[in-house]
Image: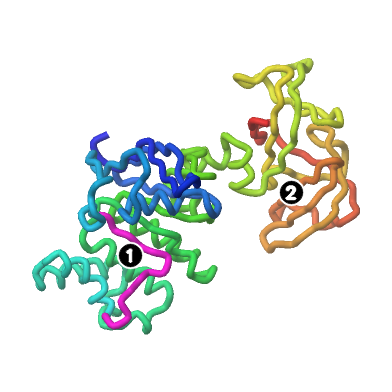
Amino acid sequence: MSDGVEILGLSKRYGDFVALDDVNMSIRNGEFVTLLGPSGSGKTTLLQMLAGLGTPSGGDMRIGGKSVVALPIEKREIGLVFQSYALFPHMTVAGNVGYPLKMRGVARDEIAHRVNEVLELVELSKFAKRRPSELSGGQQQRTAIARALVFEPSVMLLDEPLSALDRRLREHMKFELRRLHDMIGTTTIFVTHDQDEALALSDRIAVLDGGKLQQFGTANEIYRQPKTRFIAEFMGETNIIDTTVRAGEAGLVAEDGQGRRIAIGQPDGIGAGMKLALGIRAEQISLSRDGPGAADWTGRIRNRFFLGNSYRYIIDCAPHSFVAQVSAPHADESLAPGDTVALNWTPDSLQLLPA
């Protein structure tokens, strides 16, 4: 492609430790992409390579069709927002925001004009003369974002910018980030370990683990069609059943070690005798007292937790332990620990995963 960001066979090693292993990714111009993964997955290392804060051991990175591997950080035209925001405490908001332009030798009048524009965009115009110590956490974050945007970078890199905020402010700023992206349209690469942030913000999500790109797709694809057991479990509360595929009367069935069967139809590439892991998300399970469930699965409630908008149940179904999360309006509030219940789910809620 002629624009956007391309990551081609990128690797990074520290001695014998492999931080990035042959990562390939194409990010379209104007796209909001999240690098998601647990600690040590390689997501921050990848961001650092793009920013010029480290040198890859192999591979290439291109922005706008041009390799940036050999370019110093100041020539990559990248806006970078750190977790700590890194604001100058002795400068005003306007001074912090205008600093990148001053370092580029932009005329004073032009600096003032562009600072005013970007402060209006992030709704900080009336705070222009304040210092960082006089701002809230959310205002400091918006100042850091304004500073990264003021010189009109080709790409914005955001390194866990919400993690230092309290929960309520984090929720607000999550959607504020997406609003700004939709207004400006700058290609944005966002790093987080928070699955909810990734799902809410992203056009596409790149899930990394152990330095490898595990899956790259839309939020819907990552959540509903995970390619691996790791992704299924990482992206939310997923019940995993290890099974063997058998031939049934009306198609294939997946059988657990206790002889219980779940119909799986005739999926491509799946045949009798294969080992298969079945994933069922907690919110896809419904509970009832009467009669067996969709696959004759019954269990005993071990624990019940009230979460405000939902109930979370831990259900023993030997040798398995299931988690079910039922929205409060649809929950049978009489169900309590010790009760025997049927577990129900629909066939299309099953995730077929490599064993």
Element marked by disc 2: strand
Residue 263, given in percent of the width and then of the height, sits at 74, 25
Looking at marks 1 and 2 on the same chain, the residue that comes earlier in the sequence is marked by: 1
Instruction: Determine contact: label 1, label 2, CB under 8 Å.
Output: no
Nearer to us in this view, 228 or 176: 228
Quarter of the view holding residue 289: top right
Q: Whole-Å distance between the Cαs marked 1 and 2?
A: 39 Å
Range covered by the magenta-colored residues: 78-91
Residue 242, given in percent of the width and then of the height, sits at 74, 33
Please give the residue where the numbered disc 2 appears in the rendered image.
Answer: 324
Q: Residue at x 22, y 71 (%)?
A: 99
- The dot on residue 15 is none
Q: How many marks are shown on the rendered structure? A: 2
Q: Is residue 46 magenta?
A: no
Q: Amino acid at mark 1?
A: Ile
Q: Residues within 10 Å of mark 2 (few under 14, many from 20)?
A: many
- The dot on residue 145 is 1
Q: Is residue 82 magenta?
A: yes
Up-down relation of residue 87 to residue 41 (above or below): below
